[in-house]
Amino acid sequence: MLITGASSGIGEAAARVFAQEGAIVVLTARRADRLAALVGELRDKGAEASCVVGDVSVADDMAKVVDFAVTEYGRLDSAFNNAGIGGDRSPLHLMSDDVYDTIMDINVRGVFNCMRHEIAAMLPHGGGSIVNNSSVGGLVSIPTAAPYIASKHAVVGLTRAAADEYAKQGIRVNAIAPGTTRSEITADWFGRNPGLEELVNSATPQGRTAHPDEIAAAAAWLLSDRCPFLTGTVLPVDGGYVNQ
């Protein structure tokens, strides 16, 4: 099991959830210290875990990560392409090129880089399962976040295209679309914007933000053999937000 963006938030939660369910996990992110600490924690609990520092926007890094997984464990059966960023919020006509480029490089090129190397590793072994982390922003619009919305819609497109292309070769590709989820990023976001947390919660039928474990559990189900006839889907995990 390969998990990108594993040093914090949903990726960190996924590492714990997947390991608890018995998966061998290979973690990657840009922060070596956080990865090493998480691997140590998982090993102390009896899990088999390793890490490789990598940037999803760099194709060679993802090739290195996938090669490590295959070399170390013989094959790659599943991957959770979780790494992504939100970026600055601004009206579209004021958005800078740098913000757009950074969001697209990580959120779209990053998923593309991961999938092409993961799929290449899975094909010789008869298939596998991939889950990409999109967002409710991949299904609906959110003001002042045009590049982010575009990037997460693109993740949905990549997911559906790959699911169709590789279904007959035994590779399932799905996506999750989380609503607002508790993390270091959202804590900082709420802290800098008084009243924003209450506003976000009021817009969600369940009236709260998600815990990272809840998102990780949904990804674990999609990646598992409990849903072998499911591919090309985008699963909202959002407390009912997009159902309104």
Image: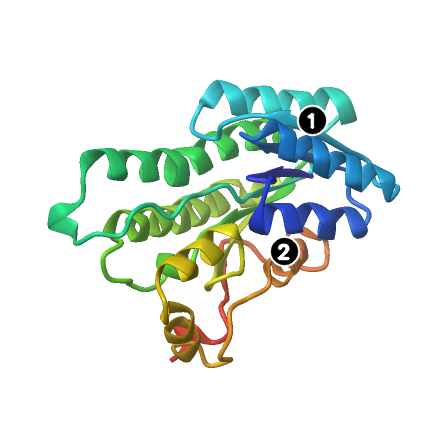
Q: Which residue is mark 2?
A: 216
**Where does the image place residue 5, in percent across and percent down from the top left?**
55, 39
Which residue lies most toward the right here? 46
To which quarter of the image does residue 170 belong?
top right
Helix, strand or loop for disc 1 = helix
Query: Is 213 rendered above or below residue 165?
Result: below
Q: Residues within 10 Å of mark 1 (few under 14, many from 20)?
A: many
Residue at the image point whose x is 13% and y is 47% from the top: 94
For discs 1 and 2, the disc positioned in front in the rendered view: 2
Looking at the picture, tell me which residue is in the foreground, 216 or 130.
216
Whether residue 10 sits left or right of residue 141 in the image: it is right
Residue 27 appearing in the image: no
Residue at the image point whose x is 57% and y is 50% from the top: 9
Quadrant of the image containing the C terminus:
bottom left
Q: How is the image coloured?
A: rainbow
**Where does the image place residue 147, in percent across and percent down from the top left?**
26, 47
Query: Is 87 rendered above or below residue 192?
Result: above
Residue 35 appearing in the image: yes
Quadrant of the image containing the N terminus:
top right
Query: Is 117 rendered above or below residue 99?
Result: above
**Where does the image place residue 194, in percent across and percent down from the top left?**
36, 67
Residue at the image point whose x is 62% and y is 31% from the top: 123
Q: Which residue is mark 1?
A: 69
Whether residue 243 sits left or right of residue 62 in the image: it is left
Amino acid type indicated by mark 1: Ala
CB under 8 Å between discs 1 and 2 = no
